[in-house]
Image: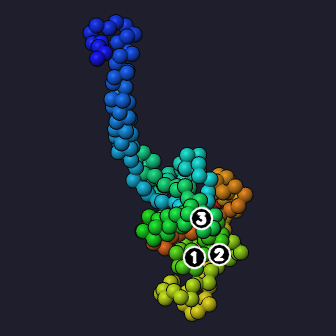
Amino acid sequence: MENVPKLRDLKGKEKLTYFWDYYKWVVILIAVGVVVAISIIRAVINKKDISLYVLAVNADPYAQEEVGDTLFADFMQEHGIDPQKEEVMLNSSIQYLGGSSATDIYAMQSIMTIMGSGSADVVMMPEDLYREQASLGAFVPVQFYLSPEEMEALGDRIIWVEKDPDLSTIAEQGEDDAPGAVYARGILMDSGDKVGASGIYGDTPPVIGIAGASEKPELAAALVRELLGLEKNN
């Protein structure tokens, strides 16, 4: 049997080589454990409360890092939201192409879960997807946060959607619940507003609205108005 040298009998580099040969996996596992522990501690220490959750489907997936804080900075300051303790969370991670691939199925499940659970407050989506979700009653009526004058001024930027006839929901805020009735459920954004200027949707502006299950509809309404560049409600 080959004799294994003892650490005390080795010198200089021999000790380092010996140590690495026999203990490298222990060292690696300890190092990984330390990194994970530090990450968890940082996450706990730096965790912020979410003032509003903005779901931006098909936005630039890197938008969270590039424009997340700056896009909402004015709104947070105006509404007294301390950026050290709270945040307006921008989720731009979901990409939905409208197909039947496993990726699209997962994306749609994620969208339905986030919106149905009440996590999302403000939602931005491509128009086709927005209309599909709006037909299921997924968004707050536009007249909840826009005046008749503002709706008239926005004209064809208002997204009117016919409700799914199989739904038996209660009419909201005086809306006609008769079959074939249409509902104002969102606003098409443009290059002149903050979202357009940020570039997170490129040359294709999304439709913006308030999730029907939002637990903070008033604050969400204020953010929608701010992103649209509308004056404050009197």
Q: Position of residue 3 (x, y in %)?
A: 29, 13
Picture coordinates of residue 220 (x, y %)? 50, 65
Residue 134 numbered tag: 1
The residue under label 1 is which amino acid type? Ala
Is 121 located above or below residue 79 in the figure? below
For the residue pair 85 and 204, the one nearer the viewer reads as 204
Residue bearing mark 3: 101
Q: Quadrant of residue 17?
A: top left
Query: Is residue 138 visible in the rendered structure shown here?
Result: yes
Q: For the residue marked with disc 2, what is the amino acid?
A: Ile
Residue contact between numbered discs 3 and 1, judged by CB atoms under 8 Å: no
Is residue 234 visible in the rendered structure shown here? no
Callout 1 environment at 10 Å: few (<14), some (14 to 19), or many (20+)? many
> Mark 3 and mark 1: span between their CA atoms?
23 Å
Figure quadrant of residue 207: bottom right
Q: Secondary structure at mark 2?
A: strand
Is label 3 in a helix, a strand or a loop?
loop
Residue occupying image coordinates x 71% and y 75%? 156
Spatial CA distance of label 1 from label 2 is: 9 Å
Residue 11 appears at what percent x and percent y? 34, 6
Residue under numbered circle 2: 159
Indicate which label's residue lies in the foreground, 2 or 3.
3
Task: Mark 3 or mark 1: name the one nearer the start of the chain.
Answer: 3
Quarter holding residue 136: bottom right
Q: Earlier in the sequence, mark 2 or mark 3?
A: 3
The kind of residue on which mark 3 rests is Ser
Given contact means CB atoms under 8 Å apart, are the residues at marks 1 and 2 in contact?
A: yes
**Figure quadrant of the C terminus:** bottom right
In this rendering, position of residue 50 left or right of residue 150: left
| CA distance separating discs 2 and 3 | 28 Å
Residue at position x 31%, y 15% in the image: 2
